[in-house]
Amino acid sequence: MSYMPTDVQSTAFWAIILILVIREIVWKGIGLWKAARNKQKYWFIAMLIINSVRIIPIIYIFLFQKGKKGI
């Protein structure tokens, strides 16, 4: 009886979860930083409280940010 496939699948699962968490932190951090810098407190609060899987920070960064658009 071999436990290798289970160990490999478990490692791959946690690696994917880690990558997704890091991406979420990066997008949320960029969005929060830009909202704070532009003094848009409602966007800052929305991004801070609502866990949107990168949707709200991306919408803010590309559509609603004052001044220069994009990252």
Image (cartoon, helix red, strand yellow):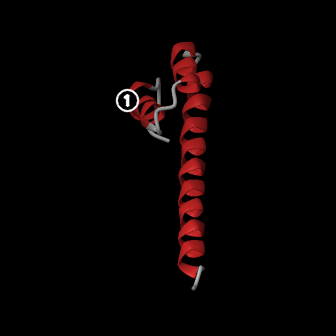
Viewer-nearest residue: 30 or 46? 46
Viewer-nearest residue: 6 or 64? 6
At x 41%, y 24%, the residue is 64
Q: Is residue 34 above or below residue 8?
A: above
Most distant residue in the left direction: 63
Viewer-nearest residue: 56 or 5? 5
Q: Is residue 31 above or below residue 25?
A: above
Q: Is residue 32 above or below residue 13?
A: above
Q: Pinpoint residue 63: horizontal percent, then vertical percent.
A: 37, 29
Most distant residue in the bottom direction: 1
At x 55%, y 73%, the residue is 6
Q: Pinpoint residue 27: horizontal percent, then vertical percent.
A: 54, 41
At x 62%, y 31%, the residue is 33
Mark 1 neighbour density, 10 Å: few (under 14) some (14–19) many (20 or more): few
Left-right relation of 65 to 35: left
Q: Secondary structure at mark 1?
A: helix
Left-right relation of 19 to 52: right
At x 54%, y 62%, the residue is 13
Report which quarter residue 44 is drawn in: top right
> How many numbered badges does the structure rendering display?
1
Q: Pinpoint residue 32: horizontal percent, then vertical percent.
A: 59, 29
Q: Pinpoint residue 35: horizontal percent, then vertical percent.
A: 56, 24
The N terminus: image quadrant? bottom right
The amino acid at mark 1 is Leu
Most distant residue in the top direction: 42
Which residue in the structure is indicated by mark 1? 63
